Image (cartoon, coloured by chain):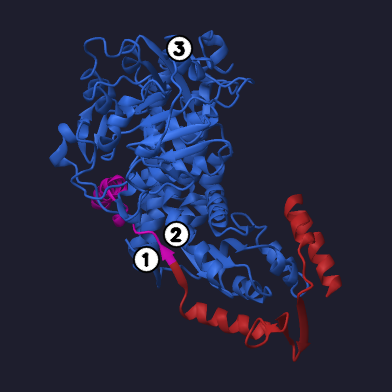
Chain colours: A blue, B red
Amino acid sequence: MNDKKRIYSGLNMYENQIPFMLISGRGAGFHVEQLIKKFEIFNLIIYDENLTFVKLSMHLIDWEPILVYFSQKCRTISFTYNSNPETLAQLILYTVKNINPMLATNIYFFNHLMNDFMKRVIEEVLKDGFLLVLGLGFYDDEIISLENTIININNNYPIFSLDNNNKMCDIPLFIVGSGPSIDNDIEFIKKNQDKAIICSAGTGISVLYSNGIKPDFHFEGERAPTKLNGIETGLVEKNLSLYNKDGYFDDIIFAGLNVLHTRVFELFKNKFLFFRASDCGSSVVSDKFTKVKITNPSVLNAIVSLSVILKFKSIYLFGADSGFRDNTKHHSKDSLYYTEHFNEIRPQKFKTIEGNFGGQISADVVLSWIRENIEAVLRIKNPETTVYNCSDGAKIKYTKPLRSSEIKLTKTYTKKQKQEPFLSKVKTYNKNDIFIHETIENTILNVIRDIEVLEQICNKYVKSITVRELYVIIQVIFDYIKQKPQATKSLLGGTIKTLSIYTYMHTMASMDNEKNNEFVKKYLQILLDFLKHAKEDLINRFLQDK
Amino acid sequence: MERLYKKNLELFKLKFDKNFIDDLQQSELSAFSIDSKNNDVDIYFGNEKIYPFGAKKSATLQVDEFIKNPKSYSMAPAEMGDPLGEFQDKYAKLIEQLLQR
């Protein structure tokens, strides 16, 4: 899709309201003075390479009325600056995410004194803006995470957590996914399996199994029944069971995110769990345990994030294509998705990106999301860590493209040596040391109190809300949730944000104000229905016997 | 101008964090010159005039143009692929059901 097509004039503007405006920072500042007189701007980000022009404007205009204007409730003004356009775009998106990710869906630009740098920044913002509204989570998913985490902790599985002794690790690490290009590299992996730690990611294990290779570690991260392009492929457990024969799992160490169903852990003799950050399940776990950031949408993301914090010196990505040259060759010929569901899967082209080894690669939303989240992790990695992308798929920023034929490894390692970097951080803990002191019941009671506050807000406006009030009401709800503990953020935040974002996107895209006013009343009614359901469900699940 | 700058700086100190203020204060303006005339200002970067007209007039023209033709970007949910599309369909159905009540 060409981003340029999506920039147009005539976005619906209600009574001169502009929820979010992005202004290039070059200039004397008179335009800012004038814009707040003509429009009701709620959030303004002024961006530039540096603060020179801001300082200049401070000699020319009185900023007091502007700062007073943006001191009112639900209004923000931010200055973002960096000499690298990509970094600046990320800073802008980070600022937007902190205010309200929904704002990334509708942006007004005031292109004052544009130059190539500013244009590049806007291109980057538009390219990555969609990430802000993906992966926000939803109630049912978070409930699964909470219940599975409690069971997994009560089952006493060993837990991964970093300690103070976290040195660089010299042993090469192979991360193996099931992208189609893995078929070209499988012989290399087979020949070098004693020279690197092999970690399989999700269905990557099917490729290794089919080629007689045993990974040292196998990782899974999917909590719910796996669904791919609408096809129910069953629990991860069901998929894995296909390879659980002839002792294949016996000396593989299984690493699962806390959200996984306990039956998946039970398939393996040797296992550990690790916690993900910003998750409802992890919210009941003490912060002294490592909670790994950016572990979604694919388990590949979880392994990359974990490997980076474990300070591996050399990480090699295989079958991490994050795209496809031909949408009929979407996975490795040996993967479950290829052998069992080949005809049903047709990834949709969302964007075209540069190939890791040249040419152009297509990617759908999820594959783009996987790639962008890997990049988000690698952007801030330890500079001593080098990540080699050996996959003939999408180019991944902050990795070095390297064909497997060019990799020269000489040193061999024993199984024990290969297990040590992960297992030295894995211990069994007393469950009383794992859970936060607050009981689960107290956590749930706090969430219920938050539900009741949100119900009051919705009830107050459900009869009278019009599109004019929509932004402010959504922002008040978002700000309320933002200051609450992780359990509220996870259980309520994701669903409410997603519902709000879609309501906002649709009302901004439609010029029919009468219908839109009806639409936003229904939005608050649906929100109330959700809150009522969530309250009843939480009581039934966690408090009924209390 | 210096007085205005000092007043603004004090206000900025109340609103923004110390790192931002430090960066702001360290920003170098020596390449700029300002020529005030006819209730407007011309700003030069070296010998190059930044605005074709005075800074105020240029801002007014640009704001007037923005009022007539605001530049905006809107994310198109239908183009976002299956995960969002599926959600959107479900949501649309739910809204439809409620509207029929």
Q: Is residue A486 left or right of residue B92?
A: right
Which mark is on residue A6?
Answer: 1
N-term-proximal mark, 3 vs 1: 1
> Which quadrant of the view contains residue A206?
top left
Q: Is residue A504 above or below residue A153?
A: below
Q: Is residue A433 left or right of residue A396?
A: right
Circle 1 packing at 10 Å, graded few (<14), some (14-19), many (20+), is some
Three-letter code for the amino acid on which mark 2 is drawn: Leu
Which range is magenta? B73-101
Label 3 is found on which chain of the structure?
A
Secondary structure at badge 2 equals helix
Which residue, as the protein is rendered here, is positioned at the far left?
A343
* Residue A187 in the image, given as x and y percentages of width and height: 28, 30
The residue that appears at 53% across and 40% down in the rendered structure is A481
Three-letter code for the amino acid on which mark 3 is drawn: Lys
Same subunit, tags 3 and 1: yes
